[in-house]
Every structure is written in structure tokens, then in C-alpha cells.
Amino acid sequence: MKKRSYSIIAGLSYIIIFFAAIFANFFVLEAILQDPVNTIQQDHTMVRYGILAFMLTVIFDVVVAWAFYELYKEHYLSILSTLFRMMHAAIMAVAIFALPFTLKLSTSHEILNQVDIFNTIWLIGLFFFGIHLILLGRIIKRPKIIALFLGIAGIMYMIDTSAHFLLPNYTSYASLFLALVAIPSIIGEMAFAVWLLAKGGLEKQ
């Protein structure tokens, strides 16, 4: 398979991850957090689709890891970068196990506890995802601005995860940390996805 094909696969997979994650996070999880019991009892179909969406992000995360390895396997950091992304996918898969149990619960405390378990495990996975992004930023040679944003996003993921566990009053700074992670991540990863679809694999990496 040509590098151009791997690039398109990676770009399309990134787009799928992006939209699946938006639905699962900002529509499903947010609804559960706002009204746990009613969402689980009245909108359980949406919750099930949300769980499926999270599962899709894991599947396509593995696809992206494979495609990136094939694209950049000549680089000495490629295997290490791939392994850290696979670690993130594996941890995310474990985190998802907490969500189906919410469908059998009937109190807000129990439901939110399962969501908290999911978020905590996923948060640990994002630390390793951050390492992957830092390495990816080192691996890709162009565009340099995208490589820079990927590296910054990776650092922010690691800082945010660390802050969750080290700062007792993390919630006081949650909005700030969210912005510090989201801005470089969205710019870097989405720009890279578009570049992969438009130009990736057309030149020697």
C-alpha cells in the first residue's frame, strides 16, 4: 500500500474520532452529568449510542496508530510513538467498561460514580496520549507549525493529567486547564488530519 493511502486512512480515521468524541462527550456524558437519573432512564438509547461512539474512537485510534507507523516507520521514534498511542487506546477501552453499568443504576450517586471511574481511567490514558503527540511532533517534518502544536498539545495533556492528581483544588482551575489542552489539541490534530487528507504521503517523509 502506498504512503498516500495510509495518509488518507489516518486522516479519515482522525475525522471519525473527532465527531464520535464530540457526540459521546458533549452530548451524552454532559447530559448524564447534568441529569443522571433522567438521562439514564429516559434517554438510555442515546447513552447506548454514546458508549458505541466511545468504542469507535478506540477502534479508529488503533487504525491511526497503525497508519502512522506505516507512514513514518523509517523514523527511529515511530515504534515508540505507536506504542504510546496503543497504550492510550487500551486504557480508553478499559475505561469504557464503566459506562454500560450506568444503564442498570437508579440513583444519581451511583451513576455519577461510574462516570467518574470512566473519566479517571481515561485521564490516565491521556497522559500517555500526550507522550505520543510529543513524539509525533518530533517525527513529522512538515508542516512545522502543525508539529509545534502537536508537541504543545502533548505537553498540555500531560500537565493536565498530572494537575488532576496533584492539585487538591483542581476544579478551581479546570476551565483554564481545559483551554490549555483544547486549543493546541484541536488546532494541531485537526489541522494535521486535514493535511493528511490533502497532502500527506505525496512527498517523501
Image (cartoon, rainbow, N blue to C red):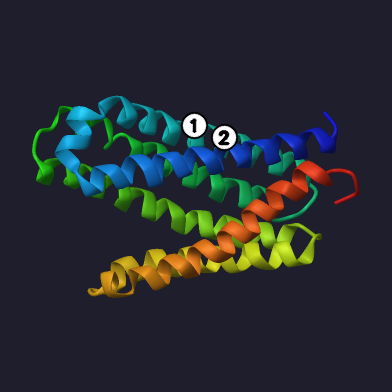
x 18%, y 46%: residue: 112
**Label 2–label 1 contact, CB within 8 A:** yes
Measured as percent of width and height from the top left, residue 26 is found at 39, 47
Name the mark on residue 20: none
The residue that label 2 is drawn on is: 60
Vertical side of 171 occupied by 127: above or below: above
Q: Amino acid at mark 2?
A: Phe
Q: Residues within 10 Å of mark 2 (few under 14, many from 20)?
A: many
Residues 112 and 139: in front is 112
Measured as percent of width and height from the top left, residue 71 is found at 77, 43
Identify the image quadrant of the N terminus.
top right
Q: Quadrant of residue 131?
A: bottom right
Vertical side of 146 occupied by 30: above or below: above
Vertical side of 202 occupied by 40: above or below: above
x 26%, y 27%: residue: 44
x 57%, y 60%: residue: 185
The residue that label 1 is drawn on is: 56
Please, which residue is most extreme toward the right here? 203
Q: Is residue 73 visible?
A: no
The number of numbered discs placed on residues in the rendered structure image is: 2
Measured as percent of width and height from the top left, residue 30 is found at 31, 47
Q: Quadrant of residue 127?
A: bottom left
Q: Amino acid at mark 1?
A: Leu
For this view, does 58 lie left or right of residue 114?
right
Name the secondary structure under disc 2: helix
For this view, does 64 lie left or right of residue 199?
left
